[in-house]
Image (cartoon, rainbow, N blue to C red):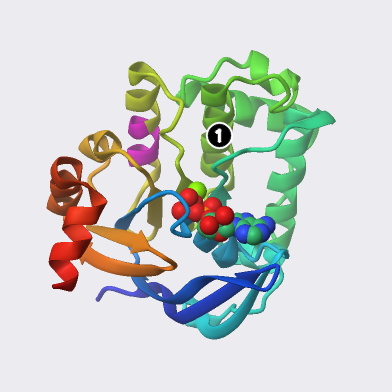
Amino acid sequence: MTKNLLKIENLHATINDIEILKGLNLSINEGEIHAIMGPNGSGKSTLSKVITGHPLYNITKGYIKFNNEDITYSEPEQRANKGIFLAFQYPVEIPGVNNIDFLRLAYNEKQKNSNLPELDPLSFFDLINQKAKHIHMNTEFLARNVNEGFSGGEKKRNEILQMSLLDNQLSILDETDSGLDIDALKNISTSINSFFDSKKAIILITHYQRLLNYIIPDFVHIMQNGQIVCTGTAELAKKLENEGYNNLVKQKIN
Ligand code: ADP
Ligand code: MG
């Protein structure tokens, strides 16, 4: 039987007292890939941050359940430990923090929380090198500071490395495809597809149908003005590419 993983009902959220999410509903089962598309400023990144518990956002109404457990007001660390991962649209640079140390800290924190053994620097080095090679990432990036001086595409690849390392049940990828050249896009899509399994779910936030040629979503949602206004299958993204948001959403509302 399919099991529900994420359930969001009538979610309203504000930042600086401005309401950005205005009654959003979304339900995701294990084994499903959902794409979220929609014009700039419609609230896609806000949704991703609200699901992961970003402290600047306030939820004013509605709820978020993960594996049937209410996480609406849980701390971000708790959500991460329960199995929610976010690859940021704009990954931050952390000068002075070595990438491999950062990754090991995140990994060991998760291991500790699941009562699994932590890894010493040497064993972790082997694990992360293997993961980096798997996603065709130059291992030079492991020795550098987190995202410091990385190009847009390299930052995105570093997010995918974190995703595959932390191996969470729900991964939200916020415009991971933007800034990637064609080879990198194919490559990262292959990594995402091989990472995915029937116990996991992925939310792909994207502007481009192109990504969805490589990673086929079960559902495509269109967000507008803080709500999901239209849901369809992968065909919807193709229609969107031809018709644009305005025409498509108008047709749906009329
Ligand atoms: P998307 O990812 O769909 O492009 P966002 O979630 O980034 O949209 O933004 C949704 C809306 O929230 C935008 O209109 C944006 O200007 C607004 N917003 C985001 N952060 C803030 C903030 N700190 N203060 C006020 N408005 C904000
Ligand atoms: Mg965004």
Residue at figure coordinates x 37%, y 44% from the top left = 206
| Image height of 10 relative to 155, above or below | below
Report the front residue among 215 and 9: 9
Q: Is residue 38 visible?
A: yes
Q: Is residue 84 visible?
A: no
Q: Is residue 193 magenta?
A: yes
Q: Dot 1 corresponds to which residue?
A: 161
Q: Secondary structure at mark 1?
A: helix
Magenta part, dominant SS:
helix
Report the number of discs. 1
| Image height of 202 relative to 124, above or below | below
Q: Quadrant of the C terminus?
A: bottom left
Report the front residue among 25 and 166: 25
Could you tell me residue 130's position as x and y percent?
A: 55, 25
Judge from the rendering whether residue 70 lies leftward or rightward of residue 30; answer left or right. right
| Image height of 181 relative to 88, above or below | above
Q: Amino acid at mark 1?
A: Leu
Report the front residue among 38 and 236: 38
Quarter of the image where one finds residue 144:
top right
Could you tell me residue 85's position as x and y percent?
A: 56, 54
Where does the magenta region start and end? 189-194
Q: Quadrant of the N terminus?
A: bottom left
Residue at figure coordinates x 59%, y 20% from the top left = 151
Could you tell me residue 232's position as x and y percent?
A: 18, 62
| Image height of 145 relative to 159, above or below | above
Residue at figure coordinates x 51%, y 36% from the top left = 160
Q: Is residue 242 magenta?
A: no
